[in-house]
Amino acid sequence: MTPNKEDFIKAIFELGGKEKVVTNKDLVRMLSISAASVTDMNTRLLKEELITHLPYQGVMLTEKGLLIANQLIRKHRIWEVFLAEKLGYDWNEVHADADLLEHVSSDLLIERLNIFLEEPTFDPHGGVIPNQDGTVPEIHSTPLIECRVGDRFKIQEVDDQEDFLEYLLYKKVHLGKEYTLAEIEPYDGPLTLETPAGEKTVIGHKAAFKIFVDIIE
Amino acid sequence: MTPNKEDFIKAIFELGGKEKVVTNKDLVRMLSISAASVTDMNTRLLKEELITHLPYQGVMLTEKGLLIANQLIRKHRIWEVFLAEKLGYDWNEVHADADLLEHVSSDLLIERLNIFLEEPTFDPHGGVIPNQDGTVPEIHSTPLIECRVGDRFKIQEVDDQEDFLEYLLYKKVHLGKEYTLAEIEPYDGPLTLETPAGEKTVIGHKAAFKIFVDIIE
DNA sequence: AATATTTTTTAGGGTAGACTAAAAATAATT
DNA sequence: AATTATTTTTAGTCTACCCTAAAAAATATT
Ligand SMILES: [Mn+2]
Ligand SMILES: [Mn+2]
Ligand SMILES: [Mn+2]
Ligand SMILES: [Mn+2]
């Protein structure tokens, strides 16, 4: 296994390759490599039985591939916790370094680090950390866009794109924060969130797809 | 710069390439690669002006190469401190992981880590950590083999080979520990060290070349 | 149904970093 | 001084990962 292969498998997973076929086009966009390179890597991963391939359709992860994806995500997210909690990184700064560190982390290192961090369940943007055996704890959360006016909730997870995290930092939206959904403008308009203290925050319509909440009672 | 190039430059440094010409043979032994691969890497590093090359003699580091070596050693040793102090690694366990982590450490990461570790001066076996600018703090220490009977000293630094560190762990020799040199057997015989409490430790002749001490007054 | 567009694959090539086998240069031995 | 042994270099290959350009297949549009 090499860093490039690992990142490729992770990309397939993040594009839904656990349940559905992922197209070459999507991988081209996600990894910023040429279409020919995607075909090339596909044939190599196919040879190792990490993916299944439907010609001209796309690829899906095998059990073996899925395990590698989850173990890599475990490493990635544990490093993100370390960078945020111990080294004082903001949540939009952790990804780049974690994306490199994940590939050079022995099992011993990750398990010691996990203990040092007191076995965290979530990474800095609320992504759940897979277990050592590749299983993933089941967490219930709802996309903010599906909430109704009047719902009370806590922020559970947010999309991990750097610019989106920076936007949320600016809006002072952070994990665990409690809000009530005060208003939704029609025709894909903005959402207004209100804290228990009465402070209001306006969030764009598209942002509401990238925020996941835990509705209270 | 790539991990292989970085390790190659570090190997030249560790074989004395700051002051003297390092042979291909030595690099073959240190890196466990073929002689042809050494010649190959030499020509590539030469092109980047990181080394100077005397055909059929060997290579030396340029200023540029030396800077890279020192910065890599800084990263390596800071990671070693982290693994030992925060993750509970023994001093003979830190090297392998640090040897990988050193290549994926951004400047931001290393400087934050350095602060988190409270700016250590030495790595777990007493190696001095180069400064950010590539300069190296001057530390005075004496090889144990040069000591005279009756000298009092503290353990300052030891060779970082894994099996040697394990041997010292078994002998309960650790950094900062105080001893008096009680006896040296002639004809390259063993050395006897004595703690202030009167406990005696016998050390092989060759080991005394790999232990460096700070003589007290 | 025919044509145009998009996507995927194939063909051919490049670089980094490794290898083996053989040639050339240097060092050691007789 | 000549021979032998060691070390370094050259020549030719290999794999991983990337590319561009062109061909083939699938999809969308007229
Ligand atoms: Mn991330
Ligand atoms: Mn990565
Ligand atoms: Mn080390
Ligand atoms: Mn290394």
Image: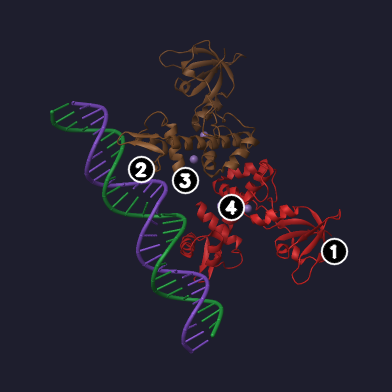
Chain colours: A brown, B red, C green, D purple
Question: Element at badge 3?
Answer: loop
Residue found at x 58% / y 33%: A90
The residue sitting at 54% across, 45% down in the picture is: A104
B42 left or right, relative to B203: left
Q: Quadrant of residue A17?
A: top left
Amino acid marked by disc 3: Thr
Q: Chain of mark 4?
A: B
Q: Position of residue B137 (x, y in %)?
A: 69, 55
Which disc, if any, is residue B217? Answer: none
- Vertical order, B185 against B97 (above or below): below
**Can you give x and y, in whole percent of width and height, for residue A126 in the image?**
55, 27
Residue B20 is situated, as x and y percent measured from the top left of the image, at 60, 68
Q: Which residue is mark 4?
A: B72
Question: Residues under labels 1 and 3: Cα distance?
Answer: 55 Å
* Same-chain status of marks 1 and 2: no
Query: Which chain is indicated by disc 3?
Result: A
The reply to whether dot 3 and dot 2 touch (C-beta < 8 Å) is no
The residues tagged by marks 1 and 2 sit, at their Cα atoms, a distance apart of 70 Å
Q: Is residue B205 visible?
A: yes
Quarter holding the C terminus of chain A is top right
Q: Position of residue B170 (x, y in %)?
A: 72, 53
Gap in angstroms between the C-alphas marked 4 and 3: 22 Å
Residue behind mark 1: B150
Secondary element at tag 1? loop
Instruction: Give me the residue at 80% from left, 62% from top.
Output: B192
**Mark 4, secondary structure of its residue:** helix
State the residue position of label 3: A2
